[in-house]
Amino acid sequence: MSIIKVNNLSKSFGGVKAVSHINMAIDGGEIIGIIGPNGAGKTTFFNLLTGIYSPTSGEVIYNLDKEVSSKSFKPHKMTGYGVARTFQNIRLFKNMSIIDNVLLGYHNNMSYGLLSSLFRLPSFYKNETKAYDEALKLLEIFNLLDKKDELASNLPYGEQRKVEIARALAAKPKLLLLDEPAAGMNPNETKELTTLINWIKDEFKLTIILIEHDMSLVMGICSKVFVFDYGTLIASGTPNEVQNNEQVIKAYLGGE
Amino acid sequence: MHLGKLFLNASLNFDWGDKMEQLIQQFVNGVSLGSIYALIALGYTMVYGIIKLINFAHGDIYMIGAYIGFALTTFLHVGFFPALIISMLLCALLGVLIEKVAYKPVRNSTRIAALITAISVSLFLEYGMMYFVKAETRTFPELLPNKQISILNTNAVLDIKNLYIIFVTISLMLILQYIIYKTKVGKSMRAVSLDRDAAQLMGIDMNKTISYTFAIGSALAGAAGVLVGTYYNSINPLMGVVPGLKAFVAAVIGGIGIIPGAVLGGFFLGMTETMVSAFGGSLYKDAVAFAVLILVLLAKPNGLLGRNIKEKV
Amino acid sequence: MKLFNKKNILSFLAVLIIYAIAGFFINTGFIDSYIFLNIVLIGINIILAVSLNLITGFTGQFSLGHAAFMSIGAYTAGILTAKLDQPFWIGIAGAALFASFAGIIIGIPTLRLKGDYLAIATLGFAEIVKIIGLNTEYIGGATGLNDIPRYTTWTWLYFCVVATVLFISNFVKSYKGRACIAIGEDEIAAEAMGVNTTYYKVLAFTLGAFFAGIAGALYANYFYFLKPDSFGFMKSIDILVIVVFGGMGSIKGSIAGAILLSVISLFLQGIPELRMVVYSLILFLIMVYRPQGIMGKSDFKFFKKRGVVNVYHQSK
């Protein structure tokens, strides 16, 4: 039983078809790679998966906790459906501390009311303490514990990417969408990240979909790869299959 | 006139002739008031387009324009058109000076800091003026022939002053149109408002462009000040506050940063206000203006002519 | 995290001690009525600034209409205590409720408007409230509402200020407050983390208005007399200036800003003709030399960060 089904999904902006007629079915527990040249519609596809855009036609159906269709997607409801994401251009809360950034990920898992937050009733302490302890554990995994009180904007680029992943994990997703997690990292950092992504997949029992240009990362950890070009899906399969696909080579290198 | 017919149909039980006259009269008044709003709104919108600053001091430049006109005509006995032009020039200078002294240091600050700076300049001009010329209202000399023409043989009259206001406004708008679309300065202004960084990379002198924008915007406000002075005959140091705010509202209604939007918003607001007054709501005319603003924004969050730009994710 | 830690107990004691000492000086007449008047003004300004800080500083919703919430609170309290002979606590409660209702109404445009457009819409809302006030006979129209009983005492003032500061500090340190701050920082990221931005923006306006309404009630029942003009555009600006001067998103800053600016304007009363001119120059100098405010964002971090906290942070 696949946990994500994408049926004939299209999105146009004015006359431009950013994504057209995508079909896919993804099984749980895998790491899926999405690759393709710039402007191929990969990020638009992510935005369709997370309710930031609504499809022009077609639909996305998740079967994570329960079945939901893209008709009821709203950006703020996605974590509730078990979907969390990171952004291509890192969207941390720059003037908040690292720990506060991660704590924000627990937003949907907090359960105390306005009165508790104003009067600091026992449920405030119970929830906040629990979230705080969990956040510390997450930061430990990402080796960021000693920087928990730094402002997000003061961290180097690679660490900001990690905080963003930690924040997404705090939302306790079943599906994690990573938009170019290795962008701007050096080969060493990328290698470390590759191991880390593999590890968190098992540790948190996740399905991960990632957009990435770094082929070593994609080939290293993805069990299946989808290739986008001009908004359409031109190939899919194991990394090896895709690598030898003629259409893919053409899309990347140009030619006839 | 289309609007007029609409109102008439709604008020069938009124005396037709009487209502018709009143409508024509209010239409003329609405166009005059709209001209003034449009002139001030243009300056707001141009400055906003270039440096994304709500220049709250703009209404006060209009007030100073009126005082310059007053001083020229009362003490130096200058005629209407020379007074208008000198006042425009001096206001242009003042605008450039304000930008250099006050706004340039906060150009890279937050927008709230820049906004409060603009408010501080506004207060400085208002109360500085009040200190020098005292708070009392001054009477403008009669500069224009006080003649009234009856429209279409009805009792509705067209004051010659209305014609002057409309004539001056339209001429200034045509000149502005020329500057913006046909000259190099205009081209750099448009470039900067579209993309400041790219414009600078293309060799456009940022400081010069900003100065020109302030000069032109302030000159238009100065012209509006002289026009209002001659039309209503009375001026005071706080006269710029309410029209300034209204003109800003007009600019936002039209879509702030968009030049035709300011003109459209100005006339739209002027007409709305006079019509509300004409139909017995004069006490609420300002409230209606702001209500219209909120309604327009709710329907079109970037103003009537504004385009809705979604943030890219 | 515990309720009874050393810091909280010490703060609690400090609050009581300040109350007792100041109360003693006021009762013995050491603090005369003129100084007390200024203390009242400072207290009201603290409430206004802290509550606006929640809306503009923390949640990043640029409001130029905070005085309207205050005026709704002031008139509600005025009507309840002067016309309907209700006790002060009902006046305050009514003021807070009506003002927060207005907060919900003005919060709704925020769902569609951002930045300068939101600012001008809130300004418009405040002007509409003022004009309705000017034209309503029942509350005295332009001549104003008279004979409001003077119920605002040191005790009422002090505990209203303490309650405002305490509740808003508690709020911003809860997950709800963090959600508001996140909206101010990056709305899209906040949404992606599950924050219902619509709800939290309206909540920020509602809470902010609630406390502004209380400030209005304290004002009405101290000065006997209300008129709509006192709550115009300039009053909203005055509150915003305190917030920016103190530091956007800093509660301590808002308190310090309210005190400092009130003291400054007190001194300026010595030169009535030039008062506003000097005030405008001071405002200008602050914005040029300390645009991040006296406290910066010190509620979050104690070390100073160069650069400015941009409320309008517009990422590309």
Image: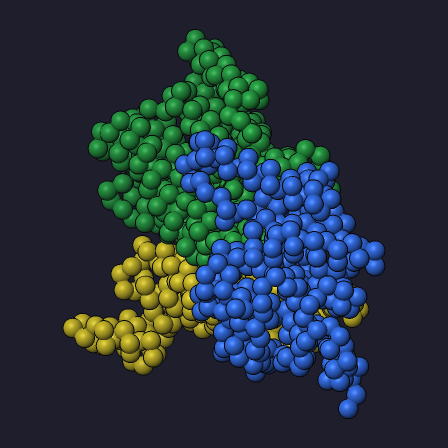
Query: In the image, C234: left or right of A153?
Result: left
Chain assigned green: C
Query: In the image, A210: left or right of B265?
Result: right
Chain assigned blue: A
Q: Is residue A135 visible?
A: yes
Q: Residue at the spot x=26%, y=61% of the render?
A: B280
Instruction: Identify which residue, B235 or C309, lies in the foreground.
Output: C309
Q: Residue at the spot x=50%, y=34% of the render?
A: A126
Q: Is residue B211 above or below residue C38?
A: below
Q: Residue C95: image x %, image y %? A: 33, 37
Q: Residue at the spot x=65%, y=61% of the render?
A: A178
Instruction: Identify which residue, C96 or C36, lies in the foreground.
Output: C96
Which residue is the extreme one toward the top?
Answer: C28
Which residue is the extreme one toward the bottom?
Answer: A256
Which residue is the extreme one toward the left?
Answer: B13
Query: In the image, C120: left or right of B92?
Result: left
Q: Is residue A193 above or below residue B196?
A: above
The quadrant of the picture occupied by the N terminus of chain B is bottom left
Q: Residue A59: image x %, image y %? A: 49, 74
Instruction: Identify which residue, A4 or B180, lies in the foreground.
Output: A4
The quadrant of the picture occupied by the C terminus of chain B is bottom right
Which residue is the extreme one toward the front?
Answer: A1
**Number of numbered discs present?**
0
